[in-house]
Image: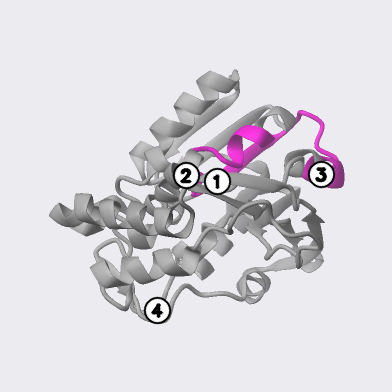
């Protein structure tokens, strides 16, 4: 958990409806790649901790008997359930809880996943708990985006002006990153490897799923991207939200008159951890 910050329920308040449209997807085929690496065959159970609207849970669900998505934000879980129904995923269920509430009577799992969510947790405590929830040969996977490699060909449209968006957010919300009711003075923590090792895991491999496809992004997509971020969750703007959105859209149109942008999909990095041999 970030130093000097305390979790509260407003961390992503109002962001759920913007998530699917705003966020870039993980690399196409990341689920199949992970399944091949781990030998997933439709048996066992998946736990996706901090699942949000099911971005990882749903693509992976078909490789398990059951997939459990856990998140403290009920709006995120409502979006996940909606997407599951839309996509015909019938073996997923959704649990409203924090990672710190684990094991929460959920039982054992073949795979426990954290997709860009572990840094929000009380990491040492959560890692130790998850170690005890894994089956003997189970795997903890940590999924994140990598910076895309340098482009060999120019993009067909301007790149999204993420720096400009960040400047506008700071103009409205102040220079220190907001997160729920608190501030992230020093950002979010890294070095998950040290935390996992300290909890009794050993590194079991790294997989990078390539991407690089060109994604066309509209101004609406980038507005959704902005509101999907914890530091720009809609509630943070209070009664200034309409003014912020107006200025955001004006800034985007100032960068591209037709409101269209392009960027490369980033590769997906999957770090895998298993119970240390001495602890098996």
- Of labels 4 and 1, earlier in sequence is 4
Q: Is residue 49 left or right of residue 264?
A: left
Circle 1 residue:
217
Image coords of residue 52 (percent x, y): 47, 44
Question: Mark 3 Cα within 10 Å, few/some/many (few <14, many 20+)?
Answer: some
Q: Is residue 38 left or right of residue 144?
A: right
Q: Which mark is residue 221?
A: 2
Question: Mark 4 Cα within 10 Å, few/some/many (few <14, many 20+)?
Answer: few
Question: Mark 1 Cα within 10 Å, few/some/many (few <14, many 20+)?
Answer: many
Q: CA distance from mark 4 to mark 2?
A: 32 Å
Q: CA distance from mark 4 to mark 1?
A: 34 Å
Q: Secondary structure at mark 1?
A: strand
Q: 175 or 12: nearer the eye?
A: 175
| Image depth: mark 3 or mark 4 in front | 3
For residue 202, what is the image quadrant?
Answer: bottom right
Q: CA distance from mark 2 to mark 3?
A: 27 Å
Q: Which mark is residue 33?
A: 3
| Image depth: mark 4 or mark 2 in front | 2
Circle 4 residue:
3
Which region shows up in magenta?
34-60
């Amino acid at each position: 958990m970030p130093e000097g910050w305390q979790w509260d329920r407003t961390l992503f308040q109002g962001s759920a409806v913007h998530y699917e449209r705003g966020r870039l997807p993980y690399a196409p085929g990341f689920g199949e790649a992970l399944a091949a690496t781990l030998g997933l065959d439709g048996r066992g159970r998946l736990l996706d901790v901090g699942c949000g609207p099911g971005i990882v849970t749903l693509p992976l669900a078909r490789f398990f008997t059951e997939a459990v998505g856990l998140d403290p934000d009920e709006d995120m879980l409502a979006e996940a359930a909606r997407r599951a129904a839309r996509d015909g995923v019938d073996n997923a269920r959704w649990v409203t809880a924090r990672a710190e509430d684990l094991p929460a009577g959920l039982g054992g799992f073949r795979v426990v996943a954290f997709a860009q969510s572990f840094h929000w947790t009380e990491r040492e405590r959560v890692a130790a708990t998850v170690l005890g929830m894994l089956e003997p040969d189970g795997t903890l996977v940590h999924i994140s985006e990598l910076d895309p490699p340098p482009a060999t060909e120019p993009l067909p449209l301007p790149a999204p002006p993420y720096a400009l968006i960040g400047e506008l957010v700071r103009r409205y919300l102040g220079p220190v990153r907001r997160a729920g009711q608190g501030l992230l003075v020093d950002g979010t923590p890294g070095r998950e490897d040290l935390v996992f090792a300290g909890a009794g895991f050993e590194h079991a491999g790294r997989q990078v799923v390539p991407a690089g496809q060109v994604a066309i992004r509209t101004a609406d997509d980038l507005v959704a991207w902005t509101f999907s971020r914890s530091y720009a969750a809609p509630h943070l703007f209070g009664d200034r939200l309409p003014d912020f959105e107006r200025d955001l859209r004006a800034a985007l149109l100032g960068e591209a008159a037709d409101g269209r942008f392009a960027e490369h999909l980033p590769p997906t990095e999957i770090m895998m951890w298993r119970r240390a041999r001495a602890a098996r």
